[in-house]
Image (cartoon, rainbow, N blue to C red):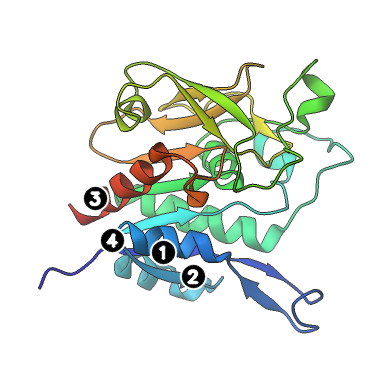
Amino acid sequence: MTRKPVIGITLDSDIGGSYSRYPWYAIRYNYVDAVVAAGGVPLLLPYSYNLLQEYASLIDGLLIPGGFFDICPSHYGETTSHETVKVKPDRTEFEFAITKLIKEQGKPILGICGGMQLMNVIFGGTLIQHIPAEIENCLAHEQPNPRHEPGHEIEIIPETFLHKLANGEIRVAVNSAHHQAVRKVAPGFIMNSKASDGIIEGIELNHPAQFAMGLQWHPEFHISELDRSIFKHFIKAATT
């Protein structure tokens, strides 16, 4: 029997509070369910630096989920932080380490929401710290309605890999839950989608031999056929 691809998923964490008064790790169900539905085997990755090499040898692809936190602006060369910026240094540093290692190995990477922002910063891009503070008449990127519903449309850039996954569609409705965004796309990556207010909604590695894609929306909610196609092709890339 052919072995299913193993997908490493990084975790959120806290020192204690809502879930337990003791330190905990957490992941939302639908990140894991989306991997399973697409044919992968999820492997959750605690922040154990002494296991980085073992993680890298075990997994065939890496999923970097979002979270209610931000990357410290010092990572992309800025010396001040907007008042809305909240950081989780332990998570960020671990995700930096495992993402760099998996990219070096040529294995597929899918970054979702904050995971896309992290990918962009790791490889040399920058971020907008707070969209409403910089973009006049911006969309409600922190949509008021539930995330299992669409919040706005994106425009997909023709001739990108995302365009191929969308079967040639140019406009797709997505959900939205972020206050930061990519400002400058990392070298080696290209923008594959944007919102009507100009906010970058997706990036992808401009190299056909490796799948590395970041998406500002949350495809794990499967609100469109494109969302399912993204996970399907991520798992396919981890299989070959």
Q: Earlier in the sequence, mark 1 or mark 2?
A: 1
- The mark that comes first in sequence, 4 or 3, is 4
Q: Which residue is mark 2?
A: 45
Where on the picture, by quarter, is residue 194?
Answer: top right
Which residue is tagged 4? 39
Of callouts 4 and 1, the N-terminal one: 1
Residue topped by disc 3: 236
Say whether residue 229 is left or right of residue 175. left
Report crowding for label 4: few under 14, some 14 to 19, many 20 or more residues within 10 A (C-alpha).
some
Residue underneath mark 1: 8
Percent position (x, y) of residue 175? 60, 39
Where does residue 87 sit, x and y in percent of width and height?
76, 53
How far apart marks 4 and 1 lie (CA) works out to 14 Å
The mark that comes first in sequence, 3 or 2, is 2
Residue 24 placement (x, y as % from top left): 68, 77
Q: Is residue 33 above or below residue 116?
A: below
